[in-house]
Image: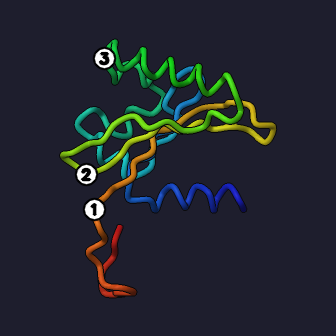
Amino acid sequence: MLNKLFKSVLEQDRASVVICDLTDTIVYMNPAAVKSYHKYGGEALLGSNIMDCHNERSQGIIRKVVSWFAESKDNNMIYTVYDEKRNKDEYIVALRDENGELIGYYEKHEFRNPETAEHYDYSKSLI
């Protein structure tokens, strides 16, 4: 049941979530990510290597971040960039198993835009 709840959290998020394993394979994309990356293949990116979506410089940065995650169980999130066009901050976040061992990573987006919906406005769906 807990896995279904966690998956639902990701499925309902308005921000893109792309999860990779330690071989850099894209193992999950939430609906927001599928939509955001539709011009690059969208859902067809599942099972592909995230490195194929980045230039050589970005590949090196991702490898360095994942190595940093592996150095310590305390190294879990790093700020990567501010996207001015979409007014959001982006991070790479470590994914760990119940023993704290690194099992993957994902890109996290945090939008800076204030919410425009009214409090508890049931007439509009935000997703």
Residue labelled with disc 1: 113
Res 60 → quadrant: top left
Report the Cα–Cα distance between label 1 and label 2: 7 Å
In the picture, measured across the screen, residue 20 lies left or right of residue 71, that is left
Residue drawn where x is 67% and y is 22% of the image: 71
Q: Position of residue 97 (x, y in %)?
A: 74, 38
Type of amino acid at the residue the image marks with label 3: Asn
Up the image or down, 75 lies above or below 119; here it is above
Q: Residue at x 68, y 30 (%)?
A: 102
Camera-nearest residue between 127 and 67: 67
Which residue: 64% across, 59% down?
Answer: 4
Image marks 3 and 2: residues in contact by CB distance under 8 Å: no
Element at badge 3?
Answer: loop
Q: Position of residue 108 (x, y in %)?
A: 45, 45
Check if mark 1's residue and mark 2's residue have beta carbons within 8 Å. yes
For this orientation, the residue located farthest to the left is 85
Q: Which residue is mark 2?
A: 87
* Residue type beneath disc 1: Asn
Instruction: Name the foreground residue: 14 vs 78.
Output: 78
The tag on residue 55 is 3
Could you tell me how far apart the alpha carbons at marks 3 and 2 are, in whole angstroms?
Answer: 23 Å
Asked if residue 3 is positioned above or below residue 57 in the image, the reply reads below
- Gap in angstroms between the C-alphas marked 3 and 1: 29 Å
